[in-house]
Amino acid sequence: MQNTKKLGAAIIGCGAIFPLHAQALAGLQGVELLAVVDSDPSKAEQAGREYGCMSTTDYRTIIDRDDIDVVHLCTPHHLHADMAVELLHAGKHVLTEKPLADSLDAAHRLLKAAANSTGQLGVVFQNRYNDPSVRIKQMIESGELGRLLCLKGVVTWHRDEAYYQSSNWRGYWATEGGGVLMNQTIHTLDLLQWFGGEIRSVRGSVTTDVLDGVIEVEDTAHACIDFSNEARGLFYGTNAYLVNSPVELEVVFEQGTLLQRRDCLYLWKDDQETLLCEPATKSAGAKSYWGTGHFRLIEDFYSHIRENRKFWIDGEEGLKAMKLAKDIYSSSNARS
Ligand SMILES: NC(=O)c1ccc[n+]([C@@H]2O[C@H](COP(=O)([O-])OP(=O)(O)OC[C@H]3O[C@@H](n4cnc5c(N)ncnc54)[C@H](O)[C@@H]3O)[C@@H](O)[C@H]2O)c1
């Protein structure tokens, strides 16, 4: 049954990703941003002023508020699980930024809390909403190009010493839970597993090529992913490039190949290349390499809540990319 009451929202964490959530909420009908939270008082106050809502430094003050139905988690990775467990326990709907958690133990605690809550848990993998991703998934499912043979994802981005020094949580195992795999390229790992399906085995390795001595975690990783349907995935991701290149994807079928380049999707078939999709308009303030799907995902999450339907990128779904990242670490450790 459709719930017609206005939904009250809060956002915890007013850092780099905060504006995308706040702007998406401002553009949604039937939703009101009621509170913003940041442990840094100046960030909380500024966000509250900008979006005309109350601000606080303590997220626990929003737990008992009956008018807050949905809480967005835009906090460092090591805080996702503990905050989400408390909020779900209080019956709130929680939309957490990726990754689901910093460790598999924390992720499983979170899944248990979600299973016992009247609230929903959603994970922000907004790249699943990009037009090329949607089209690739449809073409895999329709079988119109024959069987899926192999796929690859390449992410070459730039994160330098200044980026890591600008926060107190990035670059450390205890707070980020990993490096380029857990933070930047987890979206591409998620797409590879979403397209390829159930994973049979993973071999990979991680290194710190240029940020050694600056970060504890890896800046570069590669993996070979074998899927249960016999398809093979190759992945390469690094923060050691000097620019943020658009993510490249290739999906090879028996009768054609899909290529994502500069956010456009092309079909290569019968010696001809055809443009299938161009990038959607960039959302306000979005860095192009983050994708443009935040607004679509947030709107969809609220539709599911309003219509009492289970949101599809839930905890179990969010766990898959994280598990893939953790399997690449385990494989790398086993080989070193
Ligand atoms: N989906 C995407 O494309 C995308 C892009 C960037 C970041 N992210 C994710 O968003 C999350 C936040 O990343 P960011 O880049 O905005 O980080 P950030 O460091 O810029 O912001 C995090 C904010 O959380 C606040 N914070 C820390 N501890 C807190 C606490 N106990 N209570 C309340 N606030 C607290 C910090 O003061 C900071 O303002 C991460 O999970 C990150 O991976 C996702």
Image (cartoon, rainbow, N blue to C red):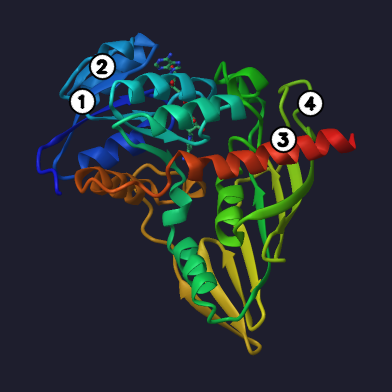
Query: Tag 3: residue type?
Result: Asp
Q: Position of residue 225 (x, y in %)?
A: 73, 54
Q: CA distance from mark 4 to mark 3?
A: 9 Å
- At 66% across and 40% down in the image, what residue appears? 325
Which one is in front, 284 or 31? 31
> Which residue is label 2 attached to?
62
Q: Amino acid at mark 2?
A: Ile
Residue 212: give its label. Answer: 4
- Is ligand 1 less than 8 Å from the beta carbon at label 1? no
Q: List x then y, in percent, for residue 257.
A: 63, 76
Q: Nearer the viewer, mark 2 or mark 3?
A: 2
**Disc number for residue 154:** none
Counting from the top left corner in percent of width and height, residue 234 is at 73, 57
Mark 3 neighbour class, 10 Å CA radius: few under 14, some 14 to 19, many 20 or more? many
Q: Residue at x 44, y 30 (%)?
A: 16
Say what secondary structure mark 1 lies in. loop
Q: Residue at x 28, y 15 (%)?
A: 45
What is the CA distance from the residue labelled 3 to the residue labelled 1?
Answer: 38 Å
Label 3, on which residue? 219
Q: Secondary structure at mark 3?
A: loop
Counting residues from the N terminus, which is met first, the one under dot 2 or under dot 3? Answer: 2
Nearer the observer, 107 or 40: 107
Q: Earlier in the sequence, mark 4 or mark 3?
A: 4
- Mark 4 or mark 2, which is nearer to you? 2
Q: Is residue 243 above or below residue 112?
A: below
Secondary element at tag 4? loop
Callout 4 amino acid: Asp
Which image quadrant is residue 212 in? top right
- Real-space Cα separation, disc 1 to disc 4, in angstroms: 43 Å
- At mark 2, the secondary structure is helix
